[in-house]
Amino acid sequence: MMITIGALFLLSLVILRVTRGFLNTDEVLLDSKLGVLAVSVASSLLEEASGKAFDENTDSATVTSLSGLSSYLGPDGEVYPHFNDIDDFNGLKKIDNTIPAARFIDSIAVEYVSSANLDVPSASKTWNKKITVFVSSPSLLGPDGKPDTVKMSQVFSYWYFR
């Protein structure tokens, strides 16, 4: 009788351990999927911006000096998704519900950067603009269990060839 009770106890411990392993695997798998989806959302926003003009003044004409570029970084009356240049994305915040697995919160910052250091914002206009996309979700958790954010940046430069 004691051997049977001991065997049942050991069997229940094995079943509990295997179940816990499955649950941990499912949690890691879900976090990985949400991370890939967040990177996909950030990439699609960067791709969308890459199809726009460098500046509102370069939308239909060419600019040959920095004074010809716009000083204001942000939409000039346009409303998303009808932006016509890269800096219109500056300050954009939107909730993305297109993916059923999670609700993503997207925010974008655009700034002038110098070619000497692309990580430091420039106080004056340059031929380079850096767009940074932040994608977060309450469902996207970091290793510490707190909500995590995916950050992706890309630098766009204005080139004019004669």
Image (tube, grey):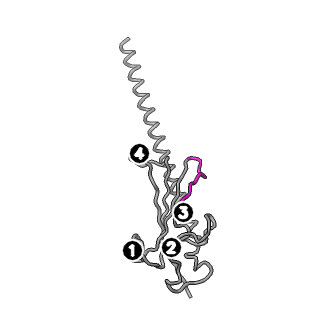
Residue 159 is situated, as x and y percent measured from the top left of the image, at: 52, 81
Q: CA distance from mark 4 to mark 2?
A: 35 Å
Q: Disc 2 marks which residue?
A: 156
- For disc 4, the marked residue is 145
Residue type (three-letter) at the residue carrying disc 1: Asn
1 or 4: tag closer to the N-terminus: 1
* Numbered badge on residue 117: 1
Q: CA distance from mark 2 to mark 3?
A: 18 Å
Determine if the magenta segment contains residue 95: yes
Q: Which residues are magenta?
A: 92-101
The earlier-in-sequence mark between 3 and 1 is 3
Q: Residue at x 63, y 67 (%)?
A: 82
Spatial CA distance of label 1 from label 4 is: 34 Å
Q: Is residue 140 above or below residue 88?
A: above
Q: Residues within 10 Å of mark 3 (few under 14, many from 20)?
A: some
Which quarter of the image is occupied by the N terminus?
A: top left
Say whether residue 155 is left or right of residue 79. Answer: left
What whole-number distance in Å separates the C-alpha atoms at marks 3 and 4? 27 Å
* Residue 16 highlighted magenta (yes or no): no
Q: Residue at x 52, y 54 (%)?
A: 105
Q: Secondary structure at mark 3?
A: loop
Task: Tell me the kind of residue under disc 3.
Answer: Leu
